[in-house]
Amino acid sequence: MKAAFPEITEIRYEGASSKNPLAFKHYNAEEIIAGKTMRDHLRFAVVYWHTFRGTGSDPFGAGTMQRPWDDGTNSVKNAQNRVHAAFEFIQKLGAPYYCWHDRDVAPEGKTLAETNKNFDAVAKVLQAEQKRTGIKLLWGTANAFSNPRYMHGAGTSCNADVFAYAAAQIKKAMEVTHELGGEGYTFWGGREGYMTLLNTDMKRELDHLAKLLHLAVDYKKQIGFKGQFYIEPKPKEPTKHQYDSDSAACLNFLREYDLLPHFKLNIETNHATLAGHTMQHELEVAGAAGALGSIDANTGDELLGWDTDQFPTNIYLTTYTMLSILKYGGLTTGGVNFDAKVRRESFEPVDLFHAHIGGMDAFARGLKIAVAIRKDGRLAEFVKARYASWDSGIGAKIESGKTSLRELETYILKKGEAAANNSGRQEFLENLINEFI
Ligand code: XLS
Ligand code: NI
Ligand code: NI
């Protein structure tokens, strides 16, 4: 088979002084930092959908992408050929993982049976390419939002047959994920929400969504799939309101329906922005609940206000992201998955390399900076000292649940006034972070 990227050889680490655009300046896979290789800390993944299926079309115009290996048809043969191009790319880039939706990798047929057959035919090539290259599947997912049947949602559709269809599709996507040794499986509720409450029975829809996830948990056990389940929060787009709107809403839903032991969150930067939060906020909410699983690494444009899925290059963003990830013990089953697409104007194959190299280098720098900040210790010490009043005396008593309103009243009446407050020192801390950037 003809090479898809004939002019490009393996991307190597050349160090910070390199001027070669097709080399890593900071990501050195083998380098050990804080006890692990950078490869194991970051667990980079390439997405199949944007990188190999993105056409560059937008609501105002047709596709622009030059993808010489793709014949533009919806055939199984073309889908199989595309797998070779994809693995050539991922291997040259040196990313250890990739992710897909079922419908990214194989075309839909006229019936579910035909669709599943197509999927199997392509999965065979995926399996062979994984074996040849050592590249692994970070997670799989089902696209239960593109086909018109999902116009009212999948698990939350008002049409019970559509729920059944989605269930069948998810069953198959889980099986293929399992066959390919996937380390996880993600649920992003593409249309699990509403456009208007006038026609929506919200309680019933949420009950149904929980049912679907319970059925998936049951089936996971039946087939012996040991991968981690993730929910990916997003507040809107395509619907006006998605039920998995942010980390807090997802955690509440999972707890309410006894699903929390089976799921972690896959947090996406651009989705945090759409929810009116920072990425760090979303990671902290998930981390505090022991549910920080994986991240979809991208960034949005705050002036545009939609899910622009740009590659992350902002060092503050990657630093804060890595600070939270390291704080909660690092990535174990999850990874740094580039759910990002090149701009419509960046239409040449080489742009895919520029984009991923930039994202990987930005995360490598974020990792190194976060490790240095943690090693320095002043930030953590400051936070610890800020809460010192809880370590003994009345604070310790409150924390351990050994007090009452009556006792607290007596305590304050005796003291007359609370102890003086200390400065929050935000500016000092911002300067401290800048020392490392
Ligand atoms: C869309 C989501 C989607 C998920 C996978 O906004 O980010 O790409 O990551 O279904
Ligand atoms: Ni995503
Ligand atoms: Ni997204």
Image (cartoon, grey):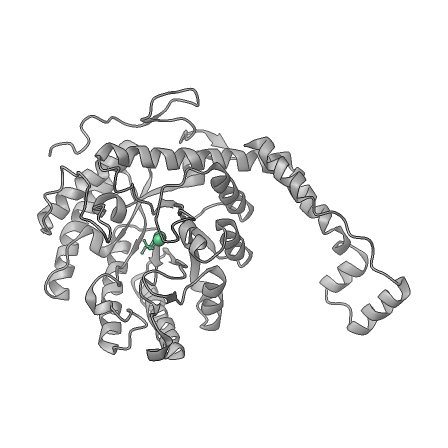
Q: In this view, does 362 lie above or below 397?
A: above
Quadrant of residue 67 within the rendered picture = top left
Residue at 29% across / 62% down in the picture?
Answer: 223
- Provide residue 85's location: percent of width, then percent of height: 18, 38
Q: Is residue 221 left or right of residue 101?
A: right
Residue 95 placement (x, y as % from top left) = 33, 37
Q: Quadrant of residue 147?
A: bottom left
Quadrant position of the N terminus in the picture: top left
Looking at this view, is 354 or 367 the one in front?
A: 354
Lateral position of residue 169 relative to residue 313, left or right: left
In the displayed structure image, the side of residue 337 where residue 88 appears, left or right: left
Horizontal side, residue 203 vs residue 151: left or right = right
Q: Where is residue 23 in the image (x, y as percent from the top left)?
A: 34, 26
Q: Position of residue 154 (x, y in %)?
A: 28, 69
Q: Is residue 217 visible?
A: yes
Q: In which quarter of the image is ligand 1?
A: bottom left
Q: Which residue is drawn at the image coordinates 54% and 32% (left, top)?
A: 437
